[in-house]
Amino acid sequence: MDRSEPRIDRLPTLYEVLARKTKPPVDLFSFYIYMRDQQRSVDYLDFWLDVHQHTSLCRHYVSELRRSILVETPELEKTGSKRSSYILDHMGEVNDPAGPSTDLTADEKLKDHNLSAFLRQENGHYNHSPQGSLGSQQSAMGASGDRPFPGGERRPRPSFVSHNSPTRTESESPAHTVARADIRASAETILYTYLLPGSEREVLLPQGIIQEITREIEEEGRDDPEVFDTAKDYTFQAMERDAFPGFLRAKALGNLVPPSLFLRLVLGLFATTCALWVGYTLIFLDAPKHERAWEILPFTIGIYLLSSHQYRLDPILALVGLSEYTFFSFSRIEEPYVRKLLNRRAVMVLLVTIAVGVAVICLFIFVPGYRL
């Protein structure tokens, strides 16, 4: 499906969710909660988000560098620049896609390739070595004190940390908010947090992909976004295939989470059992019909709760525009098409509940009594 296609009467795609183009209950926050609590594979989404953040960091760095070159060295336009300046001059406005690289347009692919090519060439100018990769990051953090460590909570391995490296590279200026060492630190943090065997939040990827990324980062010193393209695409396709359909079923066709469904099942069975016990007791006591009418209450509660469990939807909550994202925590249903779907299903569930309830209640009220 074309990313630019307007979404009027259809469910969102994973690309639109990750690009933050959707509203609750099918937004990125809800998808994150679903991956964490129900799919139990939030590490894959965290890996994808960290790689996406790494790409954004690279784009921000290059954009700042491009602006500083145009401001500080305008004579480059007249004298003819080197290849790196040529790439900067022809990079244009860098894009920030949320989908896999295979879905990029030709222009977006060219911009991303130019971005990675520039970072690789610049990295070669500074003769990167693993011992100097994260030391400047820590020194810069010590000077500013307000930059969070990119990519996750776990620090890279101690062998990659040095406190004797310079805090700035030649391409940096005091106005830069992103240092070149930040990019290197971000790439290494992703590698050590998600990809290496036995890492803190290891994601299962084909061994060939992991070995290739490890070699490019640790041996070749690369930290450009193209290093993670294959792993990012693999993760996107895995989420799109294995997790996203269940997410749409849970949020676009229902509004309850598993703990709430289990509670409704237990309470519904209890209420229905009580209603049956009372109903048979009144029948065999030959109670008058106006006394049997009290069975309406437990039968209605029991059938409503069981219907909610069966359809994974609370019709009253849906009609008032609420969806449960964690146990007894609710958010407004803001996505128009999802709101319409849930309203239709809520009306259907209510009709089923009323039909079953009326049939069962009439049976127990109007059946002839027989006193034992």
Image: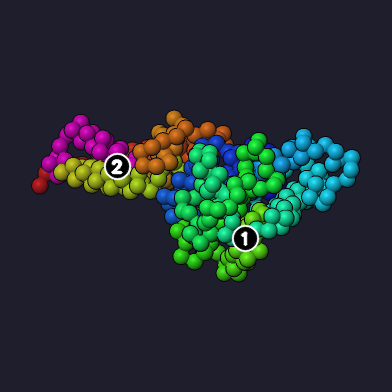
SS label for mark 1? loop
Percent across and percent down for residue 320 are 44, 30
In this view, the residue in front, 296 or 127, is 127
Q: Which mark is residue 129?
A: 1
Residue in the image at 45% along x and 34% along y: 331
Q: Mark 2–mark 1 contact, CB under 8 Å?
A: no
- Cα–Cα gap, marks 2 and 1: 68 Å
Q: Which residues are magenta?
A: 282-305
Task: Kindly identify the amino acid type of the residue bearing the numbered disc 1.
Answer: Ser
Residue in the image at 68% along x and 58% along y: 127
Name the residue that disc number 2 marks: 302
Residue in the image at 60% along x and 49% along y: 166
Give the vertical position of 189 relative to 283 (above or below): below
In this view, the residue in front, 356 or 17, is 17
Q: Which mark is residue 309?
A: none
Percent across and percent down for residue 246 are 50, 52
Nearer-N-terminus badge (2/1): 1
In this view, the residue in front, 360 or 20, is 20
**Residue 299 forms part of the magenta stretch:** yes
Residue in the image at 22% along x and 34% along y: 294
**Residue 260 forms part of the magenta stretch:** no
Task: Kindly identify the amino acid type of the residue bearing the numbered disc 2.
Answer: Gly
Our reading of the magenta stretch's main secondary structure is helix
Q: Is residue 232 left or right of residue 332?
A: right
Q: How many marks?
A: 2
Q: Crowding near pointer 1: few (<14 within 10 Å), some, many (20+)?
A: few
